[in-house]
């Protein structure tokens, strides 16, 4: 007799309601097989969405919200332009369109921009300093241009019956993080509150490790000339 082989599966999802149930069970608010109140779901959903926004802004990035693009209109003689994308978080790269070419711009920081001696000189832009949604160009555009911006987008709010906007590998750690955020709201007694907060710290470390960039390890052969 040959045992039938069970084919492996790779897809796994937890929708927002299932995620909230996991968090509420951690807090002891929901028993196995129980049903949570609407206000409890609302509390978890708010805590989840706040964490999604914060984690991504802190640099815990996942593929769902990376690589967004938008166009920025530059006006001749005007130093600054506005990034109008409502989900804009921070820039990745920018290029100015000149004819059919896209010329990369150097994205500089506040100190580098302040060090430019003649900020009013005009020409084809070479550098851009981005503060919030305001982009300041140097040289000041001599005519109208269009710039193409690639940016990291703000993580999306969770939606009813949908999977939170995180990789599935991060869900367990995120449950611990959100549960820790709610110990005061639910007046979780000690020592359970301390345990949940300790697991939250571990969860934050884990979620950063899970989202670290991975590259294939290969032998590098040096060339000697």
Image: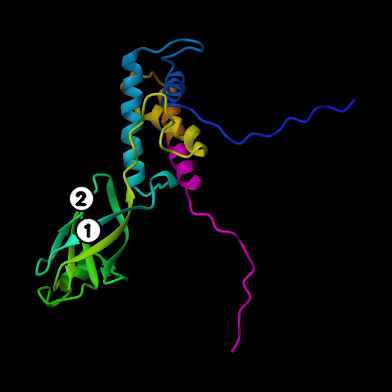
Q: Earlier in the sequence, mark 2 or mark 1?
A: 1
Mark 1 surroundings: few (<14), some (14-19) or many (≥20) residues within 10 A? many
**In the rendered view, does 117 fall on the left or right side of 188?**
left
Residue 24: x and y, percent? 42, 19
Which label is found at residue 72? 1
Which label is found at residue 84? 2
CB contact under 8 Å: marks 2 and 1: yes
Label 1, secondary structure: give it: strand
Label 2, secondary structure: give it: loop
Q: Does the magenta segment cover residue 86?
A: no
Mark 2 surroundings: few (<14), some (14-19) or many (≥20) residues within 10 A? few
Residue 6, quarter of the rendered image: top right
**In the rendered view, does 216 fall on the left or right side of 108?**
right
Farthest right residue in view: 1
> Height in image: 127 above or below 13?
below
> Height in image: 39 above or below 52?
above
Q: Relative to the observer, which residue lies in front, 60 or 100?
A: 100
> Height in image: 42 above or below 79?
above
Q: Quadrant of the C terminus?
A: bottom right
Farthest bottom residue in view: 225
**In the rendered view, does 36 fall on the left or right side of 43?**
right
**In the rendered view, does 203 fall on the left or right side of 145?**
right
Residue under the point 9% across and 74% down:
120
């Amino acid at each position: 007799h040959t045992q039938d082989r069970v084919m492996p599966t790779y897809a796994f999802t937890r929708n927002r309601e299932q995620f909230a149930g996991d968090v509420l069970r951690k807090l002891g608010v929901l028993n196995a097989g129980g049903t949570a109140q609407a206000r409890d779901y609302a509390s978890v959903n708010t805590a989840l969405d706040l964490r999604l926004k914060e984690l991504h802004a802190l640099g815990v990035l996942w593929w769902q919200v990376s690589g967004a693009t938008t166009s920025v209109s530059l006006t001749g003689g005007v130093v600054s332009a506005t990034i109008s994308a409502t989900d804009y978080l921070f820039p990745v790269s920018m290029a100015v369109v000149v004819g059919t070419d896209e010329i990369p711009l150097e994205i500089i920081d506040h100190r580098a921009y302040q060090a430019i001696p003649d900020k009013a000189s005009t020409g084809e832009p070479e550098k851009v300093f981005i503060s919030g949604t305001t982009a300041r160009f140097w040289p000041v555009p001599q005519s109208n241009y269009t710039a193409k911006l690639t940016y990291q987008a703000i993580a999306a709010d969770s939606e009813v019956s949908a999977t939170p906007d995180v990789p599935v590998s991060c869900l367990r750690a995120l449950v611990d993080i959100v549960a820790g955020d709610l110990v005061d709201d639910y007046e979780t007694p000690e020592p359970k509150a301390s345990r949940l907060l300790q697991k939250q710290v571990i969860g934050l470390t884990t979620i950063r490790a899970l989202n670290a960039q991975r590259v294939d390890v290969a032998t590098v052969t040096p060339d000697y000339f």
